[in-house]
Amino acid sequence: MQMWVAGALLTGALCAGAAGAGAEVPRAVPFTAVRLNDSFWAPKLKVYRERSIPNSWQYVQREIEDNEIAAGLRQIERGNDTPWNQANLHKVLETCGYALGEEPNPELDAKLTGIISAIRGARQPDGYCNALITVRKIKPWSWLDGRHEGYVAGHLIEAAVAHYQATGRTDFLDVARGVADNIYQVFMTDGKPGVCGHAELELALVRLYRVTGEKRYLDLAKDWIERRGKKWAYDSETVRAYFMDHLPIRDVQEVTGHAVRTMFYLTGVADVAAETGDAGLADAARRLFIDTTQRRMYVSGSVGTQEKDEGFGPAYELPNEGGYGESCAACGMVYYAEAMFRLDRDAGAADVMERVLYNAALHGIALDGCSTYYRNALHDQNHLRDNCWVCCPPCLSRTLLRVPDYVYATAGRDLWVNLYAAGEATATVAGRKVKLSQITGYPWDGQITLDVDPGAQPAAMALRLRLPGWAPSFALRLNGQAVGQPRREKGYLVLDREWRAGDRVELDLPMPVQRIAAHPKVVSNAGRVALMRGPILYGLESQDNPTVEPRLGADPGFRAEWRGDLLGGVTAIRFRSADATDHLAIPYHAMANRGNATQRVWLAQNDMPTDTAGWDGLLYRPWSPAAR
């Protein structure tokens, strides 16, 4: 049995390095080629399309108007809005791109076309495009630490890439290329010193490079990564570690600073390393991924513990009450984990991505898709979601609507299955179109069926099925026959063969309820366990229980039961506390959807001595009385 979290699963990648110089970098099977029809994600994506997007427009109206003013279409007096507000509009537009790629919507398409037209009109002759800066007659790139112009530009680029992938049109992509060309001119050709205080542009430029093939965008991304840690003369007194700008990235040994900025930055580091084969950047990305996932990540996948700087605290300091866990940081952790998969092709990174998606990210947004959390504590009380549009609501919607993009990946003759969700997909493997049909009740059920259809002619390829780190065992069948000793590489079960139409793979992943212990250095969880079943983290909410502070005995009699009447349909866990009182645990992501309540994730456990052995490479691991 492999134990979650990432460190134990990344051992092979860290020893052997990435796939090798010149190796093809895995690419996602694009969201436009994946159609989910499961009972978990498909209804949520429908909510984000039909409720989150319409709800969003009211919060970005001023940003739309700024572009209309800059384009000469309106005349409105403006005050001093927050400098990075345009980024929220761009995140909404990115969300809309994924929505259009998943389901045609002529009305939404027309609305986007109008907004994009205004953004095109707001461009400056040199390609610069930030309507808020233009309308207020602010000199571009004049306050790198505080105005977030690189952050805004990055989100424009990501939105344009999503729109291009969804529609095939280049009107928005042309704006993004002009923005990137302007930044290249200002910073690389003209040699402007410094780098933007809020990372985002780095990862966005890699995405732009992937769809355009223009190497200068990759060069610019690497340049901005390498700029951090240099002794520029900045116009603020903020400690440079807050920006991950205190040392050159190749020398950084631990994550610091504002969690969102750090996650976005390290995503760019990992992606540039994968695309360029830069060994120094790859080592930094791996080292800091381990530092994050083995020492500084909540069991939900959230990162960032300190309110004072919305950032990373000391190693193993993971408070349950008062912890921060900003929603945007969880989104950034998804991107970082996905980038680490591309770098090392290791299932441990995909495990982290799954953990964050099903728990931390989903906890950030209500079931109705219209209210969100800025911060996500594991233990909370009477803390309702709201609509704090500083940054998180559109970041959550764009991240979660992109779930189909995370399911499959390909490179050469390899096809990876990174997430399990029922639906249809068409992947291109070694130049051949391969149809995939996945049938499963995941994450509530671990039985997965995958039909593989390469068409009329057989196709030779390696199908790589992620064996989740949480899985205590598995059974694998190919065309009804048991595969007793499948090849295993970097956490994947590998079926390398000539595939024919009608081939069927069945993977059975038992899902017992597991008690999870935290590393002994996480003092806030001493003598406590968290409950997990499959990839889902559970907790107690006061509406369902006489107390949310029970003490567990040796055998709580855990029983999973489907509750179609509860929270839109969830598998809940019933158990008895040490004093024989019945309790009900619900998925962490579904908490705080029924009004004021008290929530708890970590529960007191009887007879749980501190076990200091066997924790190398682990932050969390299963616990049972028998394992003491």
Image (cartoon, grey):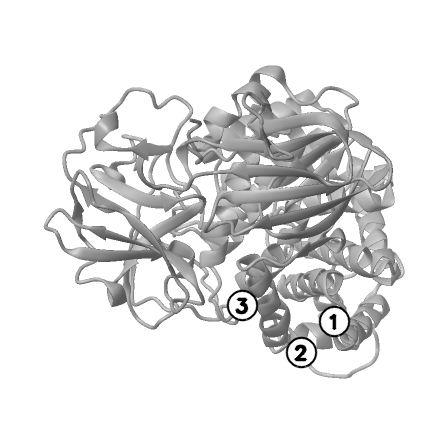
Location of mark 3 (residue): 389
Determine whether label 3 and label 1 are within 8 Å by CB.
no
Q: Nearer the viewer, residue 223 or 298?
A: 298
Say which residue label 2 marks.
Answer: 78
Q: Residues within 10 Å of mark 1 (few under 14, many from 20)?
A: some
Distance from disc 2 to disc 1, alpha carbons, whole Å, reads 8 Å
* Residue 331 position within the rendered picture, expressed as x and y whole percent measured from the top left: 55, 51
**Dot placed on the residue nearer the N-terminal end, 3 or 2:** 2
Residue at image point 77% right, 40% down = 501
Element class at badge 1: helix
Query: Is residue 228 at all visible to an observer of this figure?
Result: no
| N-term-proximal mark, 3 vs 1 | 1
* Count of picture labels: 3
Numbered disc 3: secondary structure: loop
Rounded to the nearest angstrom, the CA distance separating label 3 from label 2 is 19 Å
Which numbered dot is residue 556? Answer: none
Locate residue 293 relative to residue 194 in the image: left or right: left
Q: Is residue 624 above or below residue 357?
A: above
Tell me the tag on residue 135: 1
Of 153 and 55, the residue lying toward us = 55
Residue type at mark 3 is Trp
* Foreground of the two, 222 or 48: 48
Please tell me which of labels 2 and 1 falls first in the chain. 2
Query: Split into 4 quadrants, where in the image is the C terminus?
Result: top left
Expressed as whole percent of the image width and height from the top left, the position of residue 398 reads 63, 59
Residue at the farthest top position: 15
Amino acid marked by disc 1: Val
Between the C-alphas of marks 3 and 1, the distance is: 21 Å
Q: Quadrant of the N terminus?
A: top left
On the picture, is 389 further left or further right than 530? right
